[in-house]
Amino acid sequence: MTKKAKTIVLDANILIRAVLGIRTFSLIAEHRDKILFCTPQTCYSEVAFHIPNIARKRHISPAQEQEALDTLNDLKQLVIEIREDIYGGFKEEALNRICERDEKDWSIVALALAFGCPMY
């Protein structure tokens, strides 16, 4: 009997921590053989969009900012991008669960519903 791999959906905030921090990237890399980490495709775009603003606020040099963007590309080897056509059918249910909290995060909830897995 084969054991099913655990799947965890990561949001943009966790991806940012993986790119700009140390521990999160290491944890994802360390557990990639046991856990399938995934994220909606839009999260990578969101992170790439926010990195320059975060870099400016944290007084990160242009070289460090570029390193963060390179790390974001490396992260794509560890956290799989999932297209909306896979989880889009769960949008209405996801929006109902979110209520008025943060409707732009519907894709995180919808992906977790599609895969039947937890969200972090």
Image (cartoon, rainbow, N blue to C red):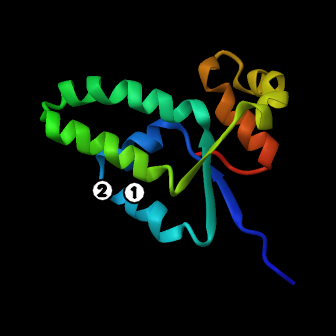
Q: Which mark is residue 22?
A: 2
Q: Position of residue 101 (x, y in %)?
A: 61, 20
Q: How busy is the neighbourhood of tag 1: few (under 14 within 10 Å), some, or many (20 plus)? A: many
Mark 1 and mark 2 residues within 8 Å of each other at the beta carbon: yes
Q: Amino acid at mark 1?
A: Phe
Looking at the image, the residue that sits furthest to the bottom is 1
Q: Residue at x 64, y 18 (%)?
A: 103
Q: Residue at x 78, y 48 (%)?
A: 115
Q: Position of residue 81 (x, y in %)?
A: 61, 43
Question: To which quarter of the image does residue 62 belong?
Answer: top left
What residue is disc 1 on? 25
SS class, disc 1: helix
Residue 65 higher or lower than 32, as above or below: above
Q: Which mark is residue 109?
A: none
Q: Position of residue 17 (x, y in %)?
A: 37, 45
In the rendered view, does 1 fall on the left or right side of 11?
right
Q: Amino acid at mark 2?
A: Ile
Q: How busy is the neighbourhood of tag 2: few (under 14 within 10 Å), some, or many (20 plus)? A: few
Question: To which quarter of the image does residue 102 belong?
Answer: top right
In the rendered view, does 10 fall on the left or right side of 50?
right
Q: Position of residue 78 (x, y in %)?
A: 52, 57
Residue 35 higher or lower than 84, as above or below: below
